Image (tube, rainbow, N blue to C red):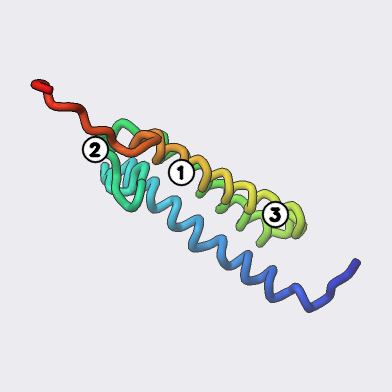
Amino acid sequence: MDLGLSVFPIRIIFFLALFPVAFFWLRRTWRILVKKDFSEVALKKGLPPPNAEKYAPYEMAINGIAGVVMVVVIVFVLLGLLDYDTWVAIAGSTLWIKLFASFALGRQAHGLGPAKKKPAAGK
């Protein structure tokens, strides 16, 4: 089934969206690895956990691997080494796996439930 030019703009937009996504993830990796900035590690509601440096290597690995995969997909598409279905599958899977992994890491770092208050010692 040849869709012709009707889906061409969507394909271009999706391909162009890979650039800022890869940049953002690699920038987060750079901030954690080089600058030792843990302000974006394991976020939950926009806030890092109190012990963010404990989870920094995991967040760095998640962002680094996902960013490199996106850059490789961009390069392979520009070189004509991947057809549309293949690079969309790789990029889409990478995007969702990265989002789920970062979400899980954030929940692990902050705890799974709301904070429970301890009863007073005298009661």
As measured in the structure, the alpha-carbon distance from the residue carrying label 2 to the one carrying label 3 is: 38 Å
* Residue at figure coordinates x 58%, y 48% from the top left: 96
Residue 83 rendering spot, x and y as whole percentages? 77, 57
Q: Is residue 19 left or right of residue 118?
A: right
Mark 3 closeness class: few <14, some 14–19, many ≥20 residues within 10 Å: some
Q: Which residue is mark 3?
A: 87
Taking depth in this image into account, of 103 and 61 the one nearest to the observer is 103
**Residue 31 locus on image (x, y percent):** 32, 48
**Residue topped by disc 1:** 103
Residue found 52% across the figure and 43% down from its top: 100
Between disc 2 and disc 3, whose residue precedes? 2
Q: Is residue 56 visible?
A: no
Closer to the chain start, of discs 1 and 3, is 3
Mark 2 packing: few (<14 Cα in 10 Å), some, or many (20+)? few
Q: Image check: 110 left or right of 103?
A: left
What kind of element bears circle 2? loop
Quadrant location, the N terminus: bottom right
Q: Residue at x 13, y 26 (%)?
A: 120
Residue 60 percent location from the top left of the image: 40, 40
Name the residue tied to disc 2: 50
**Furthest residue in direction left, as rendered:** 122
Q: Residue at x 83, y 75 (%)?
A: 4
Three-letter code for the amino acid on which mark 1 is drawn:
Phe
Evaluate whether residue 67 shows in this view: yes
Say if mark 2 contacts mark 1, CB within 8 Å. no
C-alpha span from label 1 to label 3: 24 Å
